[in-house]
Image (spheres, rainbow, N blue to C red):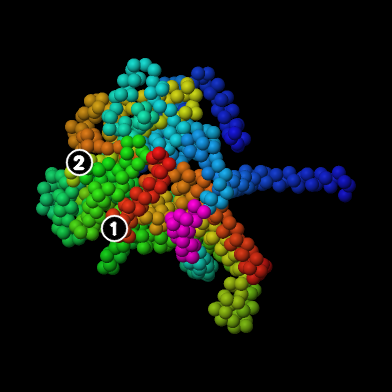
Amino acid sequence: MRLRPPFAMTALAACLLNTAQVNADSVDLTMYYPVAVGGALTDVVDNLVEEFESEYPDINVEAIYAGNYDDTRVRAMSAMEAGETPQLSVMFSIDLYELIEQDAIVAFDDLVETDEEREWLDGFYPGLMENGQLDGKTYGIPFQRSTIVLFWNKDAFEAAGLDPETPPENWEEMAEMAATVREASNNEQWGVMVPSTGYPYWMFQAFAFQNGHRLMSEDGTEVYFDDPAAVEALEYWVSLATEHNAMPDGTIEWGTLRQNFLEQSTAMMWHTTGNLTAVRSEANFDFGVAMLPMKTQRGSPTGGGNFYIFEDATEEEQRAAMTFIRWMTAPERAAAWSIETGYMGVSPAAYETDALQGYVEEFPPAAVARDQLEHGTAELSTYQGGRIRRALDNAVQAALTGQMTPQEALSQAQQEADNVLRRYAR
Amino acid sequence: MSFTNHRKMQLYGALLLLPAAVLLTTFAYLPTVTTVINSLFLPGFRGAPTEFVGLENYQVLFDDPTFWKVARNNLIYAVGTIPTSIALALGMALFVNRKLRGRGFLRMAYFTPTILPMIAAANIWMFFYAPQIGLFNKLLGMLGFSGVNWLGDPSIALSSVIVMSVWKEAGFFMIFYLAALQSMPPELKEAADLEGTSRWSFFWRVTFPLLMPTTLFVLINALINSVRVVDHLFILTKGGPNNATNLLLYYVYENAFSFFDRTTAATITVVILLVLAVVATLKFTILDRRTHYQ
């Protein structure tokens, strides 16, 4: 039994009356969505929704910008608790386990009816589907998806006597090149920055995967933080500052890093490809985008947001939500979205559209995130994900700030994670 | 007064109280009660029923080193912000209460931080603090010092958050002091001048005691503010690095919404409420007795 405040009832009644007047058959959908990078992405979403509504007059979509990924989850979950569940939302792709544990979402496999719909479901890059699937069912549809890419300042490379067209291929080269830039600039410019606030676990996962190590089990019940390969990865990250004098001490802020790069205070940065269009429009120097460097293999976790449909919606609303999601992820829209943001086109078909093909030809960095997908891995996602990620975030930050050695920090995170996951590991 | 009239008045009074009572019950009393209840239960896993565990959640919380770290951070934060911001507010109020050129402009400048939304202010400060491109390190650089990683170094990150909070709070408290100063009868100053009282002793013997009600009010506000910090942490540090700037309410938020652990969140909330209740009682019994009301 849920207590509903009376104003919710009146709002509901008003809503019903309203739709009854407009169109007896129309469906109202509410959707929350996050923006985790700079730029006027809300306008882009608003325009898309408007276009959709004019094509489907009997479906009304109210798209509500809800902050970053965590804020969006909070808004959706609190709306659920208040008995006002949205019908669909864009949320963190790694929210899957939590949403399933709360019985909040439905599988798309249970919603698709026609062959055409099934074909749509199978049309995305498999690498992007990984975080949205569990036990052979698909719960999340890729939307604003990314990988981490390396942005490098060609002017800075040239000034330091490096080949401006050649980004680092591996860890050793990155450390060397970064140190060279630092030295050549007389300690005015840093060589490389990898953000360590906001999503430290995400960056660390890239390092670990490049060292051939996956941090979690397929079913999200175990993590492997204190493996020697993971320790080595964190040691390398720390050494960029301590040994190579190529990266600043302490943590590096996710939110201001792009500005650091644009003001040329660092020659290289690791950041989500979702920043690409913003960097392109603001940089007043020549820059390139490359896949992340490798140790034993290339690698980056995927990231970003997926569409989910909520369990509490009526069947009619769920069908309408799926119509909307299909429209939003259709090749032309995915291409337009990718061009406006830098996020990936989510299906091979998106890259076959004239728009995106032309764009990639004119601006080749736009294809790097997609090409890197081949070396991608699922983003860290487990049961009790919030707590697990926080444990790893703390470990990474403790090591980077010199409070603990990488080995100590990761052992502690492992222990914390083991405690939390004990009841799921069975 | 006849009996029915009396009853009518009572009903009238009750009706006047009703809106406030409904609001308070809905948004203060009911949530408090449910929070206390939640803190005594452990929710089941995958459909298992909720189990009554008594004070076990408190035991678990007190064994959690992060909780103690966060509590300690919050204490440092309170000690760092409350006296500083109050002293600064009083100083600013005394300063702009005098006749001086550009007084209106100064008052506005002092008050501006208060009217900025917290999130906007925090975003500005994030760029002040940014190690390479930030204002503070640019200034230090001009003086020939190498910069500091204000928010990224665990030994100073909390201080950085405190400095920003003081900046944000002092202007707000200044307004109360300014209002109190202006309502002070000018005869007191005239009488003191006739007697040749020094400025210093006039302040300590007359102004400051007369400001005590304001100080008490501001003190309570400052204390409440020091426990309800959550918004600037979102922007500035997210409680990091490694929990160095994590504060109690943010930890509650993290537990409730990032970890979906409503039980722990409820338990911490009850602990905070108890501590605040104790502090409030002390304040009203000890401080209030020493306060002059005009």
- The crowding category of the residue bearing disc 2, from other C-alpha atoms within 10 Å (few below 14, some 14 to 19, many at least 20), is many
Chain containing mark 2: A
Task: Give the residue pinned by disc 2.
Answer: A298
User: For this rendering, which residue is in front, A39 or B258?
Assistant: B258
Tell me what residue is drawn at x 50 percent, y 67 percent.
B83
Task: Give the residue pinned by disc 1.
Answer: A405
Is A76 placed left or right of A250 in the picture? right
**Is B68 a magenta residue?**
yes
Residue A67 in sight here: no
Dot label at residue A7: none
Q: Amino acid at mark 1?
A: Thr
Residue A231 in sight here: yes
Give the farthest residue toward the top.
A114
Tell me what residue is drawn at x 66 percent, y 46 percent.
B20
Q: State how far apart marks 2 and 1 are (Cα).
A: 25 Å
Is A401 placed left or right of A17 in the picture? left
**Is B200 a magenta residue?**
no
Magenta residues (range): B59-81
User: For this rendering, which residue is in front, B75 or A266?
Assistant: B75
Q: Amino acid at mark 2?
A: Arg
